[in-house]
Amino acid sequence: ARSASQDRVRDAADLFELVVAAPLRDALQAQEQPQEFVVVLDGVDQVPVGVQRMRVLQVIVRRILALPQCVRLVLTCCPAADICDALLRQEPTVVGNLDAIHV
């Protein structure tokens, strides 16, 4: 049996809308005073390499540009050239290796 949310997810754009954009929009509308929001996307490297991953990256990059300035996006993943290439074209961006940080 499929849930109603599964029926609405046809592609990466639908998924982004369902799990990021809609809840964020609700949170922004519910706030009484302006607040900063941080959205964390983890595991993008788990999307299969190829057309699927490229589509997910295109949706993320396009939607990042549409986010209000009070919203920051943190994307974490294992190093992958296609992910870094897609994100390096955006401003501002920081691509770093946390393995180099010693705690």
Image (cartoon, rainbow, N blue to C red):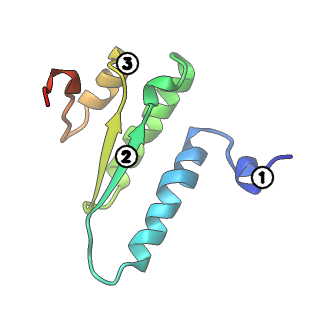
Q: Residue 41 placed where, x, y %?
A: 41, 41
**SS state under label 2:** strand
Tell which residue pokes out farthest to the right in this image: 1
User: Label 3: which residue?
Assistant: 82
Q: Amino acid at mark 1?
A: Ser
Q: Amino acid at mark 2?
A: Val
Mark 1, Cα crowd under 10 Å, few <14 / some 14-19 / many 20+, is few
**SS state under label 1:** loop
Mark 3, Cα crowd under 10 Å, few <14 / some 14-19 / many 20+, is some
User: Label 2: which residue?
Assistant: 40
Is residue 95 left or right of 42 when viewed as pictured?
left
**SS state under label 3:** helix
Q: Quadrant of the C terminus?
A: top left
Name the N-terminal-most of marks 3 and 1: 1
Tell which residue pokes out farthest to the front in this image: 103
Q: Is residue 20 above or below residue 83?
A: below
Is residue 22 left or right of 28 when viewed as pictured?
right
Separation of residues labelled 2 and 1 (CA atoms): 24 Å
Q: Amino acid at mark 3?
A: Asp
User: Label 1: which residue?
Assistant: 3
The structure residue drawn at horizontal position 37% and vertical position 39%, both measured from the top left corner, is 61
> Do tag 3 and tag 1 residues touch (Cβ < 8 Å)?
no
The structure residue drawn at horizontal position 37% and vertical position 46%, both measured from the top left corner, is 40
